[in-house]
Amino acid sequence: MKLLGRDQLETLAKFQDKEFLTTSFFLDTSKNRMSKKEIQVSLKNLITAGRLRLDRLSLPKDKKESLYQDLDEIKAFCSRNLPAYNYVGLALFSCSSRRFWKEFNLVKSPRNRLIFDRNPYVRPLSAILNEYHRTCLLTFDAKEAKWYEIYMGEIRLLENLTGDVPSKIKEGGREGYSSKRIERHRASRVRDFLKQIAKTTFMFTKDDAYDWLFLGCLDEYRLELEPLLHPYVQKKLKSRVRVKPNDSQSKILKEALAAKDLLKKQEKDEVVQRFVAEIAKDGLAVCGLGYTLRKLNRGEVQTLLVSRTFSKPGRSCPRCKFLFEDETVCPSCQIETNTQADIIDEAVETALNTSCEVKHINPHSQLDGYGHIGAFLRFKA
């Protein structure tokens, strides 16, 4: 199954068994950087290291056997599928004793990892999804319009519309009509066609089907079309790309991806700048692990910001599910907390489960100076 959206991630993050641990497996399968043999070696090393780590774990026999079976099933799956595998990354999640199995084909290479934990390790998937916006690209001229979906490095034609617009005349009249009258008639037809385009664009972008809208057209048509777009659609308009309706899909995709990369960088820079400004004025934001976890536990977080490579152990309450930096006893229910190998992953999962947005920020940003983690708040208690 290809990783496509947040709904898949939210479903995965909710799985947790009270008795048995889940195995999370991530493998870089990019054949542009590695040979098939090198990928197989990475697989073998991950499984071998996982078995050695499992041998040392102090767990009841049935729980260990479940994890050993996970490793066997992961190895068998990879042996069957890797020779013809065409994606650059693979993620597998298994809890054999509960017959839980999920597989995701990834369009971006993950770091090779194998993790035993109470629930699936979803942070790498969240980080990948954070890199992509589902985009509708509209390219048009006076006679033709095409709508494309651009998502996860792929392009798909959605619709092709042809308008009944006469060609421009160069000079003089025709059949008794003056050139000015013909041009007025043509301008009216063009406007009718643009109205059709605006209506069709609204149909494609309504109900949050697309995050962004890109336009590919001449300036004269853009200036005529934009006022005709629904205000809802205008808010999604993010960029203009240098493409025409008769351009190849490969060219359109290349231009769209370049525009998306630039927008993503600008978006993350703006998010961090806004975050720093909120912190400076003691506004609706907090920074640092302890403060952020506290606000997340209270349901006050609207958007979680995390440095992409930041990882730290922590603790969680098995009863109320609260997350802590180092509390050994839960302040709320007064029971002993459990150790978590990566409390940042737990924070990401909690955010996803409570409908918070998660922003994974590349290292060497201003967020690094604020503890590598922070949050925008819904309200301030």
Image (cartoon, rainbow, N blue to C red):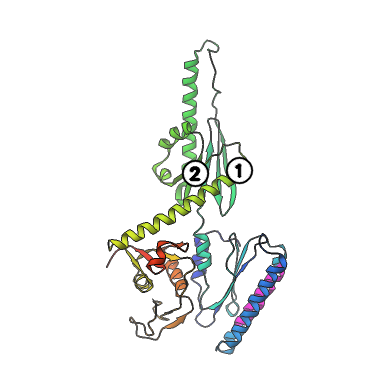
When the figure is inspected, residue 335 is found, relative to residue 220, above or below; the finding is below
- Labels 2 and 1: the sequence-earlier one: 2
Query: How far across and how far down the image is residue 138, in percent?
Result: 52, 41
Q: Which residue corresponds to the image point at 50% horizontal and 33% vertical from the top-left?
A: 218
How many numbered marks, from 0 up?
Answer: 2
Do the CB atoms of the residues marked 2 and 1 lie less than 8 Å apart? no
Q: Amino acid at mark 2?
A: Phe
**148 to the left or right of 230:** right
Q: Which residue corresponds to the image point at 35% horizontal and 61% vertical from the top-left?
A: 276
Name the outermost residue toward the top: 176
The mark lying in front, picked from 2 and 1, is: 1
Q: Amino acid at mark 1?
A: Lys
In reply to whether residue 69 is colored magenta, the answer given is yes
In reply to whether residue 185 is colored magenta, the answer given is no
Question: Can you tell which quarter of the image residue 346 is in?
Answer: bottom left
What is the spatial separation of the Cα atoms under label 2 and label 1, in whole angstroms? 14 Å
Q: Which mark is residue 251?
A: 1
Q: Which mark is residue 289?
A: none
Query: How far across and how far down the image is residue 324, in percent?
Result: 39, 78
Q: What residue range appears in magenta?
A: 66-80
**Nearer to us in this view, 219 or 206:** 219
Q: Main secondary structure of the magenta part?
A: helix
When the figure is inspected, residue 326 is found, relative to residue 241, above or below; the finding is below
When the figure is inspected, residue 69 is found, relative to residue 246, above or below; the finding is below
Image quadrant occupied by the N terminus: bottom right
**Nearer to us in this view, 212 or 209:** 212
Label 2 neighbourhood size at 10 Å, few (<14), some (14-19), many (20+)? many
Image quadrant occupied by the C terminus: bottom left
- Report which residue position mark 2 lands on: 214
Tell me the SS state at disc 1. Answer: helix
